[in-house]
Image: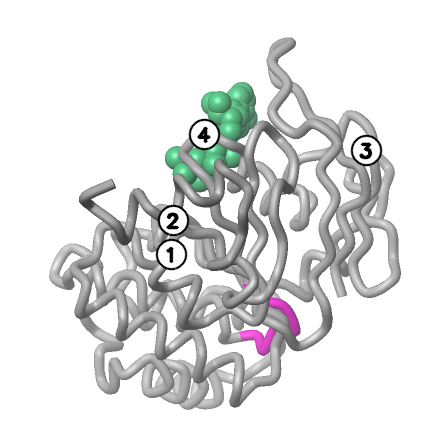
Amino acid sequence: MIILDNIYKAFNGQRVLDGLSLRVNKGETLAIVGPSGTGKSVTLKHMLGLLVPDSGEVLVEGEKMICTTGGQCAHLRDKFGVLFQSGALINWLSVGDNISLPLIEKTKMKDDQIAARVSEVLSMVEMDGAEFKMPAEISGGMKKRAGLARAIVLEPSILLYDEPTSGLDPVLSRKIDRLIKNLSDTLGVTSVVVTHDLVSAFSIADRIVMLHGGKVIEEGTPEEFRQSKNPTVVEFIDAQFNYDK
Ligand SMILES: Nc1ncnc2c1ncn2[C@@H]1O[C@H](COP(=O)(O)OP(=O)(O)OP(=O)(O)O)[C@@H](O)[C@H]1O
Ligand SMILES: [Mg+2]
């Protein structure tokens, strides 16, 4: 379980998170939606301890995330697998080597065990046999899937996805949605998906929260979210589904 409690964060005097509180329950998939620049990626970075709040607390599985100098948070960070917004494959390494890196850094696995694990996670993202492909040779959708394979290779208990479908066509986007859902079902992980894409949020999330002005302005199941009377939520939904409004 992840708890963000009353988080404030400003950059250069500009407040981005303004008393943000939210909770991600164990095993659920939470979608965080909201307009560009509203602090979704900043929120994810707080969960990971990559950003430190000006005030407020981040708790991961009951432990306070303290990533300031002298704080201990590496063991909490190790619980997470992350698919960053950019995909973030290392361009001069093959897909297989990209996915091997966390295993080399964090485990004592031997070369043949590493190769077997890489092949296993590539298969989970439907990229069997793609070990020797270079990032420049593969499509955007494959890059996302390779990034996803890397995110799950250490069997994290929490998966964070930052805009997993952005830049992909609708067919590929739905394929990524199915993968996220399958991973959540088969691995039983807790997942947080930041997305603009409401089709995706509605199809994969157990709960949806909407951020606006640095706070959570709506929270509920997809059905509850769809029926929200909050004008900002209604406008956000209409902008994606009702073109004639
Ligand atoms: N490290 C940083 N230093 C200064 N400003 C930052 C930093 N990180 C984020 N910001 C600012 O915080 C605001 C929120 O950024 P964030 O990346 O969280 O938005 P977002 O909701 O993820 O948007 P998008 O949907 O476009 O990805 C933006 O105004 C951004 O410029
Ligand atoms: Mg973002």
The percent position of residue 203, horizontal first and vertical second, equals 40, 71
Discs 3/4, front: 4
Q: Secondary structure at mark 3?
A: loop
Which residue type does callout 4 highlight? Answer: Gly
**Image quadrant in which you'd find residue 95:** bottom left
Marks 1 and 2, how far apart at CA:
7 Å
The answer to whether mark 2 and mark 3 are in CB contact below 8 A is no
Q: Secondary structure at mark 2?
A: helix
Which residue type does callout 3 highlight? Answer: Thr
Up-down: is 22 above or below 175?
A: above
Question: Viewed as shown, does residue 64 lie left or right of 28?
Answer: right
Residue of label 4: 37
**Image quadrant in which you'd find residue 12:** top right
Residue located farthest toward the left when viewing the structure as drawn: 137
Residue of label 2: 237
Discs 3/1, front: 1
Residue of label 3: 69
Residue of label 1: 198
For the image, the number of numbered tags is 4
- Badge 2 or badge 3: first in the primary sequence: 3
- Badge 3 or badge 1: first in the primary sequence: 3
The answer to whether mark 1 and mark 2 are in CB contact below 8 A is yes
Quadrant for the C terminus in the image: top left
Up-down: is 163 above or below 11?
A: below
The percent position of residue 202, horizontal first and vertical second, equals 43, 66
- Badge 3 or badge 4: first in the primary sequence: 4
Residue at (33% x, 87% y) in the render:
123
Residue at (48% x, 66% y) in the render:
151
> Which residues are drawn in magenta?
154-159
The answer to whether mark 4 and mark 2 are in CB contact below 8 A is no
